[in-house]
Image (cartoon, rainbow, N blue to C red):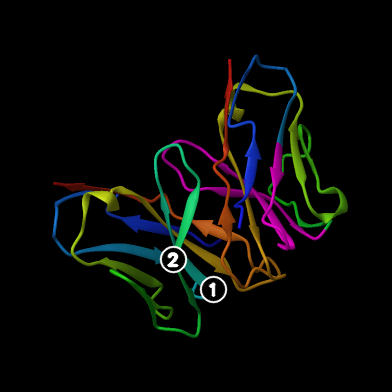
Amino acid sequence: EAGVVQSPRYKIIEKKQPVAFWCNPISGHNTLYWYLQNLGQGPELLIRYENEEAVDDSQLPKDRFSAERLKGVDSTLKIQPAELGDSAVYLCASSKLLGGTDTQYFGPGTRLTVL
Amino acid sequence: KQEVTQIPAALSVPEGENLVLNCSFTDSAIYNLQWFRQDPGKGLTSLLLIQSSQREQTSGRLNASLDKSSGRSTLYIAASQPGDSATYLCAVSLGTRSQGNLIFGKGTKLSVKP
């Protein structure tokens, strides 16, 4: 079974430029999460989807961040415009059951560097 | 606000030693607790998940315990090996409408010397 796929793995951009990250969850997983991980810290949730509905986006900085999960499968996270402080690893995870009662499976992440 | 603390931040042990990693959380109203492993430049791999009604879970050389009332969990690694070197993260799932959202600690960086 293929794991969670993320692309790109690495991205370097100038500040004020837009950037987008893509995630393909494990087949059949209804719940999808985007996390942000700063160096030396644990991941922090940005947004959680159950099927195509964003059920918790309270931690998403909506002035510059946006996300979508069309058809309840793949998801895209976008930053526009990027700031220096956005440099971090962006992790996508998925789980099978609604309500988060089971194990979350993580992708390898996208490491973003903003210059 | 739920906070998760992991002690120690880093640990170095010789191969073959048994070791314990600690995790504490401030709000006992959790749904479950998970231990993850993260290798450099990689994503997280789930090791063990303990439901709030359970006391412990075991997988191979790993044993995780949960004491919800005191807000503590431990991860016990038996007969450590160099391949166990990684960062170990503890995360709790909130027992509220945000159920499923994980709150992570900062991790314990483990180094097992041959």
Q: Residue furthest front?
A: A1
When the figure is inspected, residue B5 is found, relative to residue A81, above or below; the finding is: below
The mark total stands at 2
Of B94 and B16, nearer the camera is B16
Same chain shared by disc 1 and disc 2: yes
**Residue B105 on image: x %, y %:** 44, 54
Bounds of the magenta segment: A22-51
For the point 57% across and 57% down, which residue is it? A105
**Residue B19 on image: x %, y %:** 20, 63
SS class of the residue under badge 2?
strand
| Residue bearing the label numbered 2 | B25
Question: Residue B50 lies in magenta, yes or no?
Answer: no
Question: In the rendered structure, are the residues bearing label 1 and label 2 in contact, judged by CB atoms less than 8 Å apart?
Answer: yes
Crowding near the residue tagged with mark 1, few <14, some 14–19, many ≥20 C-alpha atoms within 10 Å: many
Question: Which chain is disc 2 placed on?
Answer: B
**Residue A110 on image: x %, y %:** 59, 35
For the point 71% across and 38% down, which residue is it? A22
Corner quadrant of residue B77: bottom left
For the point 50% across and 80% down, which residue is it? B52
Corner quadrant of residue A23: top right
Amino acid identity at mark 1: Ile
Q: Looking at the image, tell me whether mark 1 or mark 2 is earlier in sequence order.
A: 2
When the figure is inspected, residue A8 is found, relative to residue B112, above or below; the finding is: above
Query: Going by the image, does B60 lie left or right of A69?
Result: left
| Residue bearing the label numbered 1 | B30
Amino acid identity at mark 2: Phe
